[in-house]
Image (spheres, rainbow, N blue to C red):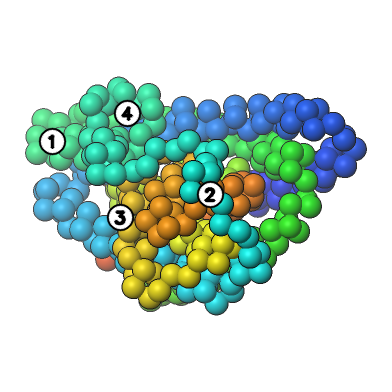
Amino acid sequence: MSRGFTASIVAALLLGILVGYFCHRGITDAAALEQLAGYFEIVTDAFLRLIKMIIGPLVMSTLVVGIANMGAGAAVGRVGARTIGWFLFASVVSLGLGILMVIVLQPGADLALPIPPTDAASGVQLAQPGLKEFVHSLVPRSIAEALANNSILQIVVFSVFFGIALAALGERGRGLVEVIDQVAQVMLKVTAYVMWAAPPAVFAAVAATVTAEGLGILVTYGKFIGGYYIALVILWVVLVGLGAAVIGSRVRTLVSMIREPLLLAFSTASSEAAYPKTLEMLQRFGVSRRIASFVLPLGYSFNLDGSMMYCTFATLFIAQAYGIELGAGQLVILLLLLLVTSKGIAGVPRASLVVLAATLPHFGIPEAGLLLVLAVDQFLDMGRSATNVVGNSVASAVVAKWEGELAAAPPDASGLRARAPGAI
């Protein structure tokens, strides 16, 4: 089924481009194009709603069981420290590489745009992240509210407390652990059913974008888009190389096995859509479920490598477009600022634009510059979503290797490692 699923995703992607292209060329009325794109988006929205339906219960059940089976709180602390350490290292690499590539490629240097008035608005009303917003996104008022809003970071915080408490109960909590484990198995089965809707959703997502924007916009922003994707490819190579330094040649198998969630994230421009499939593939690769269930949700809050690179790349692209030069000291401040602000927007819609809106004023860059990237944000989001999958997959494998919980051999014939009843 694996190859068939990948083939269906690729076919849906190509068919979506083709249908969208002919719709854009054949319909001249802008209102009709927008309406048709809206009809396509209904299919994608339905799929993403199905994904959101399972994300909360899946993250909570797998993470609680994983932590409960780690045993002592010291083990949780050790895994958490290693995970956050890797995330911070990968964040610096992503942000630094983004700065380096935009300086080398100079994608905005030829635009030479006049600086707009200081009161010119971007048209994008976005709340800027700060310490208060970060704390609110971290600490749940209610687990029911966190589940209802799919606030992954809040779900993670609650699940960590709940899992540690279950572990502390020992045998008295074992029955509840097994029940929650069964809930996790049911959610994984539901995930398999939902994934059948992925190809139509991919087709609709791509068709909607191309119908509304056409392929011509890719030519207009060709240097910016091309430069960004070149930077992403280099980032992939760096992340995979860092992974190889820890897990060895098996990193090639990992890259091969995550092609399905990677394609899904790219086609739908949603890292969240790929979460269930990524979790499944990591277990098939040999990452223990308790490590994958712990690292992956944290990664979706703290390790969005593609999004972080986009923030530096887009910020400096806008600065170049307006002829604004930033010195070496300002570039260091930019990296440190984004290292902090990019950790405070977990679960925020169009999170990268939120970070950009918070960053531009610090360097005297017009906020209206957001409009320069907003037109092609969907195409860029596809790349950064796929990169987030790569970064979090490598991180999960690395932490599993450090913890001695990466299987040395390929999984059994079913794709999942055999495990004793109640084992994780």
How far is disc 4 from disc 3 in space, using C-alphas? 23 Å
4 or 2: tag closer to the N-terminus: 2
Closer to us: 302 or 120: 120
How far is disc 2 from disc 1 in space, using C-alphas? 56 Å
How far is disc 1 from disc 4 in space, using C-alphas? 19 Å
Residue 324 lies, in percent from the top left, at: 50, 66
Name the disc covering residue 165, or none.
1
3 or 1: tag closer to the N-terminus: 1
Q: Nearer the viewer, mark 2 or mark 1?
A: 2
How far is disc 3 from disc 1 in space, using C-alphas? 30 Å
2 or 3: tag closer to the N-terminus: 2
Residue where numbered disc 2 is placed: 117
Q: Quadrant of residue 136?
A: top left
Look at the numbered disc 3 and give the secondary structure of its residue: helix
Q: Is residue 214 left or right of residue 306?
A: right
Look at the numbered disc 1 and give the secondary structure of its residue: helix
Q: Amino acid at mark 3?
A: Val
Residues at circles 2 and 1 in contact by the CB criterion of under 8 Å: no
Residue where numbered disc 3 is placed: 340
Q: Amino acid at mark 1?
A: Ala
Residue 291 lies, in percent from the top left, at: 30, 52
> How many discs appear?
4
Name the disc covering residue 146, or none.
4
Closer to us: 400 or 328: 328
Q: Say which residue appears at 65% left-offset and 36% top-offset.
A: 201
Residues at circles 4 and 3 in contact by the CB criterion of under 8 Å: no
Q: Is residue 34 left or right of residue 266?
A: right
